């Protein structure tokens, strides 16, 4: 076997060794055999290309192109041309599988099932790493840098694995890399001459000189020694660096953590900071379902699912105190402070958590009296929470909870006696660093309130109704007393700011207070269950009243629901600064999804829907050309250039399309066509910035939706309305009036959307615009039309025409 062939074999083995770290992530491991076969074929194509010989870049391009039909045959052969060539339908299917794979990775816990999407991600990932290793180690003969892609492959697996990849898998990956280094050293040595065997000392050689390498009895050659040194150094760094890097703890709302300590009779739980994970959950672009439940409660507006109580404010942040945990009792003790005269309703709730949702605090209605759940769970009596022990978390759980719905009256809260001295002392602590403005504002807002309850309601109404505060999840969360003072001054934030500030202000007034973190009740579903998503993550203050216990308040505007006992029109205390009545409470929970419905660009649409506008799709895509060149190297070079230029196609196509659409603006030309083109461009511009088109809306409603979702300032908002009014004239007026200046209006809207978007969204809109999907649809339609004359089966042709007519954007007005 030649030196390069041996090196290529070692590169393949090293890639497979590193890929072994992925084995614990999924079950079963049959995908590994497919990856190994494709990797061997990739290495064989590279060896053949190097024997031609071809230049290094051409060799890599040939390997990449050779894998494409194999991947097509393996994953999308039903959509491919002749089962091997990836046509438009095959590319669309590849994209769908990749999206499904990314979604499945976040949905399933480890070990995940090998869905088609996950299988594609695994196999293609190993092939990409294998191509990089083969190019570096064999094509360019630099094996040492080839350890970087191998390390990337191993690191991804180790980072996703719950307990790391394990020492055995690390040794396998390291052995593969060392084998590659030694093979390269042997290959370099062979280029200098023969490798002599035997223990000769050089006396029998001409000149008495020593050979470049010796046998087993002599010292190792320089390249071999170098390979060993590099391997030892790589092993040392791989062991030392992870030990020096900080570990990543699980989040409070997503992720996982250790929870309780080992043992069955005691242990403690440590503090967790919810700021980052809560804000991240609220700002997720997709509202993924965390859990769903079915309950016997007739009204779920007060059925908040509580995760943990933050009762310690040390001047840096709110966090749960370090508490002792015990085994979960058969029935949980009665809530502290709850008297016998308060109206109670006992309800039962069955909860199912998502497979991807894994954290070590169990969401429960408060106060729970019995929890039926399997696994290693511990009970923390002070906060009445359940925490996982020894790696126990919430992913894929089903459990039943019996809880109490506590309905105190305003009179009971107003007449509540003073709490016990120990509880009052613990839950009214505030740090000495708390700015004076917090205490002074609390006293000013509650001036004239005769009872502790009246003060609590005045604080809540000041935040939620008449204090001039606004809800915004993009505000930096911050921490500590300084963040509270800044929030009181800027009057903008999300639930963390409102709950933390009200709890701190209540403590300055001598009211025991803490902060609860969890989820609002969620959205009612048609099947009778209730769905709770990431955007239902919430924080709220709990204030203590003797005889009632810990009582929820809701200071965050437009979030959650204000309890009946905390409404201004239900309380029996008045004062000179009584705030204006709050908006009336809704009589029933929402029956639909929490977000505005949108069919999106990939949904099926019908032009027959009343009020629905379907405009012609504009495209300049060309049908693919057939034929091949006899000049193989030139053809491969052109193919490589096309691969490099492919990412720029959406950008260039989008710019040309925008220029064409906005060039015909003005009454001199075809005014109707120019107006429709300007409206089409406005919709695609909004799509590029993350607002997908909805053809079921009239232009006026579509404009209002773009203004609302894009959070446009007044001038761009007025420009959207002008374009919508112009297109309504064209589509509906008996004698449409020509409009001018629409191109400038569209540019103004684009500038407004760009200014309000994040940097990532701006880059995506510029380099990979979402509306470029229209190019893919047009290409697919033309490809189908080009193939139809070649088909003799009329039913097949009719079926393809029918399928093409159902594609989004194919209807005509």
Image: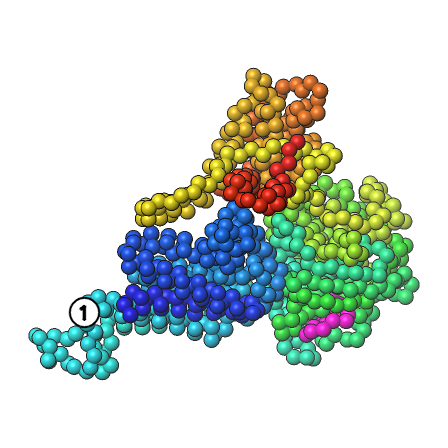
**Image height check: is 203 above or below 593?**
below
Does the segment drawn in magenta span residue 373?
yes
Q: Residue at x 52, y 25 (%)?
A: 663
Magenta stretch: includes residue 153? no
Q: Nearer the viewer, residue 269 or 161?
A: 161
Residue 334 vs residue 238: left or right? right
Q: Total label count? A: 1
Q: Quadrant of the C terminus?
A: top right
Q: Position of residue 616 (x, y in %)?
A: 60, 32
Residue ID at (24%, 81%): 216
Give the image location of residue 20, x and y in percent.
47, 69
Extreme-front residue of the structure: 792
Q: Is residue 697 visible?
A: no
Outermost residue, top side: 668
**Residue 42 percent coordinates (x, y):** 40, 60
In the rendered view, tell whether residue 503 sits above or below residue 448: below
Q: Nearer the viewer, residue 217 or 758?
A: 217
For residue 717, what is the image quadrant?
Answer: top right
Left/right placement of residue 86 relative to residue 711 reads: left
Q: Residue at x 47, y 54 (%)?
A: 84
Disc 1: which residue:
193
Instruction: Give the answer, above or below, for where 308 lies relative to 229.
Output: above
Q: Is residue 101 above or below residue 600?
A: below
């Amino acid at each position: 076997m030649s030196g390069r062939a041996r090196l290529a074999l070692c590169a393949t083995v090293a890639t497979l060794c590193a890929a072994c770290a992925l084995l614990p992530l999924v079950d079963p491991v049959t995908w590994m055999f497919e990856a190994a076969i494709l990797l061997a074929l990739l290495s064989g194509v590279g060896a053949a290309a190097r024997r031609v010989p071809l230049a290094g870049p051409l060799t890599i391009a040939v390997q990449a192109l050779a894998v494409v039909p194999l991947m097509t045959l393996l994953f999308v052969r039903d959509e491919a041309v002749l089962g091997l060539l990836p046509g438009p339908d095959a590319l669309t299917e590849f994209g769908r599988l990749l999206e499904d794979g990314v979604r499945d990775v976040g949905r399933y816990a480890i070990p995940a099932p090998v869905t088609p999407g996950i299988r594609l991600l695994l196999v293609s990932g190993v092939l990409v790493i294998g191509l990089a290793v083969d190019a570096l180690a064999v094509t360019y003969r630099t094996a040492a840098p080839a350890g970087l892609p191998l390390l990337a492959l191993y690191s991804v697996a180790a980072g996703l694995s719950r307990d790391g990849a394990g020492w055995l898998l690390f040794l396998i990956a390291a052995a593969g890399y060392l084998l590659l280094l030694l093979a390269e050293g042997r290959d370099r040595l062979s280029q200098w001459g023969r490798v002599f065997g035997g223990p000769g000392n050089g006396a029998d050689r001409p000149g008495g000189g020593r050979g470049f390498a010796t046998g087993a009895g002599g010292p190792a050659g320089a390249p071999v020694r170098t390979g060993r040194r590099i391997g030892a150094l790589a092993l040392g760094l791989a062991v030392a660096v992870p030990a020096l890097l900080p570990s990543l703890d699980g989040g409070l709302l997503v992720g996982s953590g250790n929870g309780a300590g080992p043992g069955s009779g005691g242990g403690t739980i440590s503090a967790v900071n919810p700021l980052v994970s809560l804000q991240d959950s609220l700002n997720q672009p997709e509202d993924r379902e965390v859990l769903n439940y079915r309950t016997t409660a007739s009204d779920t507006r007060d059925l908040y699912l509580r995760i943990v109580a933050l009762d310690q404010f040390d001047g840096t942040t709110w966090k749960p105190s370090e508490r002792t945990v015990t085994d979960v009792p058969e029935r949980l003790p009665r809530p502290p402070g709850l008297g016998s005269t308060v109206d109670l309703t006992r309800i039962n709730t069955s909860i199912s958590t998502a497979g991807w949702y894994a954290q070590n605090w169990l969401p429960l209605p408060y106060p729970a009296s019995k929890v039926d759940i399997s696994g290693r769970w511990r009970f923390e009596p002070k906060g009445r929470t359940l925490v996982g022990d020894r790696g126990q978390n919430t992913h894929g759980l089903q459990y039943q909870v019996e809880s109490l719905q506590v309905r105190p009256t305003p009179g009971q809260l107003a007449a509540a006696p003073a709490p016990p001295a120990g509880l009052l002392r613990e839950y009214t602590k505030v740090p000495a660093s708390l700015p004076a403005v917090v205490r002074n504002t609390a006293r000013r807002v509650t001036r004239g309130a005769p009872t502790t309850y009246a003060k609590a309601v005045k604080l809540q109404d000041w935040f939620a109704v008449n204090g001039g505060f606004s809800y915004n999840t993009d505000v930096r969360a911050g921490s500590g007393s300084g963040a509270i003072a800044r929030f009181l001054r800027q009057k903008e934030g999300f639930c963390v700011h409102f709950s933390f500030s009200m709890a701190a202000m209540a403590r300055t007034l001598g009211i025991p207070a803490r902060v609860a973190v969890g989820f609002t009740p969620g959205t009612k579903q048609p099947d009778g269950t209730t769905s709770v998503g990431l955007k239902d993550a919430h924080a709220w203050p709990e204030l203590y009243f003797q005889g009632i216990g810990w009582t929820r308040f809701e200071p965050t505007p437009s979030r959650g629901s204000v309890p009946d006992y905390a409404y201004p029109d239900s309380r029996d205390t008045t004062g000179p600064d009584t705030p204006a009545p709050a908006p009336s409470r809704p009589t029933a929970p929402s029956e639909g999804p929490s977000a505005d419905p949108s069919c999106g660009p990939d949904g099926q649409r019908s032009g027959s829907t009343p009020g629905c506008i379907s405009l012609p799709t504009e495209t300049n895509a060309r049908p693919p050309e057939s034929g091949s060149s006899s000049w193989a190297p030139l053809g491969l070079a052109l193919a490589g250039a096309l691969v490099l230029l492919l990412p720029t196609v959406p950008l260039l196509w989008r710019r040309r399309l925008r220029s064409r659409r906005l060039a015909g603006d003005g009454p001199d030309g075809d005014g109707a066509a120019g107006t429709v083109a300007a409206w089409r461009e406005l919709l695609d511009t909004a799509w590029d910035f993350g607002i997908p088109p909805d053809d079921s809306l009239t232009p006026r409603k579509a404009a209002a939706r773009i203004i609302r979702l894009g959070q446009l300032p007044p001038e761009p908002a007025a420009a959207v309305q002008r374009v919508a009014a112009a297109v309504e004239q064209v589509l509906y007026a008996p004698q449409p009036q020509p409009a001018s200046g629409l191109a400038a209006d569209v540019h103004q809207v684009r500038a407004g959307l760009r200014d309000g978007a994040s940097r990532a969204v701006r880059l995506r809109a510029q380099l990979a615009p979402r509306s470029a999907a229209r190019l893919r649809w047009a290409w697919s339609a033309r490809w189908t039309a080009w193939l139809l004359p070649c088909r003799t089966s009329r039913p097949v042709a009719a079926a393809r025409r029918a399928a093409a007519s159902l594609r989004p954007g194919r209807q005509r007005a």
